[in-house]
Structure formats: structure tokens, C-alpha cells
Image: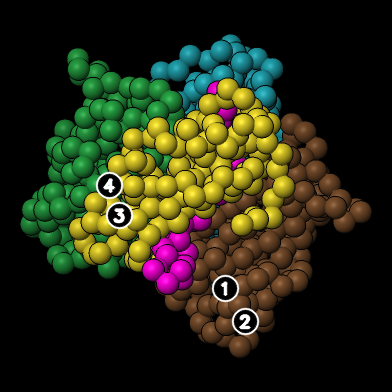
Chain colours: A cyan, B brown, C green, D yellow
């Protein structure tokens, strides 16, 4: 899927870096998250909706887990455009939780809004997807990522 | 610990409601989080720093887990002041990650700033604590919680 | 300009309500702001770049004025979808200032992301526009608007 | 008023720098804002509540003006701790508007939470004050300031 941006990666091996970083993250592994797409300035993360990530109040994904996925989508989208050897650090993010995440899996799409060698701004849109492929926007986040 | 606020709980059984809600949250249980204090308008959550919640880039707590703890501190602080039967829903929150969370455990302190029967504003301060009891502020969050 | 959303206004006279509200705002009048477009779920505000809204540090628009325009774009976008007689109140917003606003005028585009009779989520994108019609994205905001 | 922090200014002439910067800001001058206190890591700004800064919907201060004052409180608090010659730039801020600002004047108190030579985090609390000296908290903001 094209995302309408057209950023040039500074690291030709960006996909390898981002995939290796993602695969090493214990909190993402523990919830069964997968990195489905990696493009310059864009990543897409999927996670199955299961009791381990639901809130106790209703059969919906816990807001803190939606936030975790948003944070990861922001950070890995920024990482696709980082210089070789650079490490991404989340400076801040804000998330609006707009609807309960109900369905088969969660999709977190991270997109760089403004890249920079120092501070990148990115957004993440979180969708709840059904088994039939239908999607519903459940949260939106915007954050700042620094490169170290 | 007193926190300088002086809110009156609308539900005399607020502590029971908050503790039962906390104990039922699978994502909190999976990281070993404990609810150490519950007062009107205030909660304190502890979580041991262990590999399962660390980022792969360094031996520090993953920013998304810091966010998860902040979200929970905000929501449970708001819940201490909710009416009987009311359910708290996180509308939005913003978090600034200011320092790496390194140490023995994380402490998330949630405090209500402005309670309301409809929309409560709360803040959360996240500290990294050493085995010697020393604490370092690593993140601050402010969020809006709605009652349903 | 179509914005890709397709919201139905609850008030057939939404444009009149939004324009009258905008025209009555003293802070917007004092900086010469104009409401250029009003569509269901969308508004576009223009303001000339002039010394009165610049920071003293450089010939760029003061960040607080960029924030004021963002706030107004969010609130008026939400107002286009409000019920007759409803009044919009800004609950919270977050803004990332990404580049200095230099040029002839500022354009603030407000778009509803999720409408609701109680709490609407909207985003605002702020551009600096040159005399030649070129535009540069300088800030992005996301906020929550309540209807009273 | 002491604010409980104990930051050391890097510039012994910090007060002069902050006051001169404040006095040169056209948007602050136009609303009659005054810099009442300048301490290391802390500033206090007052602005009279008058029709020019009110919203048209009710006799309360426009939310965008509350945001402007918050932005200035954040930036000038950070500036008190900046190195000689450094210029502060607002990276992002988030504001929660909790109550209508009604009264005689607005007070914006900016406090540094975490100083840094690169990125400082600060908070601002906005109060509406009556002629009798009573104060009511109406908004809270947290933001990131960069030094150039």
C-alpha cells in the first residue's frame, strides 16, 4: 500500500534494521504482534485481539495496549528514515481513543509526517479489523521521535 | 502518602472497586504490576523492571510499557472518585518520556487534577526506583477520563 | 476542496452558525483572520503574516498564534457537525510545531476525524503559504471538542 | 513564591534575557500581558480579562488565548535555564482546558520539569483570578522546548 508520502531512506538497509529491531522487542512478542509492512516512512503492525490484551470491563482491547501499539508504530515508522546506526527514542506522544477496539485483530499504521535527523514527527492510526477485512478507526496518535 | 488533594469519593466502596478492577486487568497481571496505594483521587502502581518489559535497544523499560502504566494510573485514579456503578474510559492522554527507566521497579503515581461526573482530568508521574529506594522521574502524562 | 470525509451536518444551517460564530470572535478579528471555507466537517482559516503575530526572535509567526489558529480550526470544524443550538467547547488539544511559519499568510485547515453528539475528535493542519501559492506544513494538532 | 524546584541557571543574566524577550513579543503586548515573576525554572504571567481576549459564546477567555499564555509560560520558563545566547523554540505542547476562565485576570505559571541543554520539558498551570485574589485552576499544559 502506498501512503502518499515519498521519503527517501538514509539507510539502504532500513527494512532489515526495522525488522530486526521489531523482532527483538519483548513486549511486542508477548502480545503476538507482527510487522506486516515496512516502507520508507511507513510501517504497519498487526496484533491478534485475544483475552491477554483485553480490558476486564468489556471484551475490547485495553487502552494501554492500544497506546503501546501506537508508540511502536510511531517509533518504527521514524526508524525507517533514520541514518545507519541511529537509534530512535520516543520523546512524547499523544493518543485519542475514539472507539472500542473490537474484532479479530488490531492494525497500527505509523506514518512519518516530518522527518529530521534530530526530531521526527509521526502519526499513528489504529484500526480494529474484523475477520471479513472490515476496518474501524479506533485511535489516532501523534508523537515526536529523536535520533540518538 | 498524602498528595495534597482532598477529594471526596462518591462511592464509599471506592477502594474495593478500584482493586477488583485492577486485579482483573490481564495486561497488568502479565507484567507483574501491583496496586500499592489507593486513596481518593490517587493511586500508586508498582511494576518490577525485568526483561519482558524492556526495549531491545538498551536495558531500559520500553516506552510503550511506560505509557501503559501511565494510562492505568490515570484511569484508576479517576475511578477512585467515580459514582457507584460507573465505568471509566480513557478519552485521551499525552505522555512525555524524559529519561530512561532504569532500576529495580517502576512506580506510576496517578493523581486527579479535576474530577467531574462526566470528564475527569488526571496526571501520572512515572518514576524509576532503585533497590535503595532512590527515585528518578522518567515520564509525565496528563489525560482525560470519561465516566460511562 | 473536498477533504475525503463525508459527514452529514445535523444542522442544515451549519454554515451560517459557523460563520456568525467565527465573525464574533474578537481574538480572530484582531489578527485579521478570515474563514475561507466551511463544509461539513471541514473549515479553512487564513490569516495574514504580519508583525503583530510574529515572535520577536525571528520573522516567523509566534507559536502561540499558530496554536490559537489550530484551536479555532478544530473548534469550528467540530461546530459544522453540531446539532442546532449546540455550543462547542474545546476540551484539549495537542500541537506539534514542525517548521517556522514564514510567508505571506497562514492557512489552518480543520477536519473532523470522529464526530459525536458528545465528544468530537478533530485534527488541524497549519500551513505557511507564499505569495506564489506554495504551501509548507508547519504544524499539526489533534483535539477533543465537547458539545454543550 | 518558591516553587519547590531548585534549578541552577546557566546564564547569570537569565532574568534580563527573559524579560527582554517577553517585552518584545507583539502578541503578548497586544493583550496586555505582564511578566510578574522570573526565577530559575519558573515564570508567572498575568493578563487582564477583557473583551478583546474573550470568546463570543460567553464572557470567558477564548481557549486559544489560554493556549497562547500557556505556550508563553512554557517557553519563558525554559528560557530561564538556557545557556547564554541560546534561543528557545517550542517543539510541542498539549493543553487540557478544564474550566471557563472567568474573573479579573488570568495567571499563567510556567515551571520546568526537566531541564536539558537540548530538550526541556515544562508544565504550565493557568488560573483565573478574581479581584479578591481568589484563584481557580482552568487549564494545564505540558510541552517540550528545544534550544537552538
Where is D148 relative to D64, above or below?
A: above
Which residue is denoted by mark 2 in the rendering? Answer: B14
Which residue is denoted by mark 3 in the rendering? Answer: D62
Please name the predominant secondary structure of the magenta segment in the image.
strand
Q: Are marks 4 and 2 in contact (CB under 8 Å)?
A: no
Which residue is denoted by mark 1 in the rendering? Answer: B79
On the same chain, marks 4 and 2? The answer is no
Q: CA distance from mark 4 to mark 2?
A: 39 Å
| Nearer to us: label 3 or label 4 | 3
Q: Residue at x 24, y 19 (%)?
A: C130
Q: Secondary structure at mark 4?
A: helix
What chain is tagged by disc 3? D
Q: Secondary structure at mark 1?
A: helix
On the same chain, marks 3 and 1? The answer is no
Residue farthest to the bottom, as pictured:
B12
Q: CA distance from mark 4 to mark 1?
A: 32 Å
Q: Secondary structure at mark 2?
A: helix
Callout 1: few (<14), some (14-19), or many (20+) C-alpha neighbours within 10 Å? many
Q: CA distance from mark 3 to mark 1?
A: 31 Å
On the same chain, marks 4 and 1? The answer is no
Q: Are marks 1 and 2 in contact (CB under 8 Å)?
A: yes
| Nearer to us: label 4 or label 1 | 4
Q: Picture coordinates of residue B134 (x, y %)?
A: 85, 52
Q: Picture coordinates of residue A126 (x, y %)?
A: 46, 45
What chain is tagged by disc 4? C
Q: Residue at x 24, y 51 (%)?
A: D52
Amino acid at each position: 500500500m502506498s501512503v502518499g508520502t515519498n521519503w527517501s531512506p538514509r539507510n539502504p538497509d532500513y527494512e532489515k534494521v526495522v525488522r530486526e529491531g521489531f523482532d527483538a522487542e519483548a513486549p511486542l512478542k508477548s502480545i503476538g504482534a507482527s510487522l506486516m509492512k515496512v516502507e520508507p516512512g511507513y510501517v504497519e503492525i498487526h496484533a491478534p485481539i485475544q483475552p491477554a490484551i483485553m480490558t476486564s470491563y468489556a471484551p475490547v482491547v485495553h487502552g494501554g495496549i492500544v497506546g503501546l501499539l501506537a508508540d511502536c508504530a510511531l517509533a518504527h515508522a521514524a526508524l525507517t528514515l533514520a541514518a545507519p546506526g541511529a537509534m530512535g527514542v520516543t520523546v512524547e506522544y499523544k493518543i485519542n481513543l475514539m472507539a472500542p477496539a473490537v474484532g479479530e485483530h488490531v492494525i497500527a499504521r505509523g506514518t512519518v509526517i516530518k522527518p529530521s535527523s534530530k526530531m521526527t514527527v509521526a502519526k499513528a492510526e489504529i484500526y480494529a479489523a474484523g475477520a471479513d477485512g472490515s476496518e474501524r478507526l479506533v485511535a489516532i496518535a501523534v508523537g515526536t521521535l529523536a535520533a540518538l
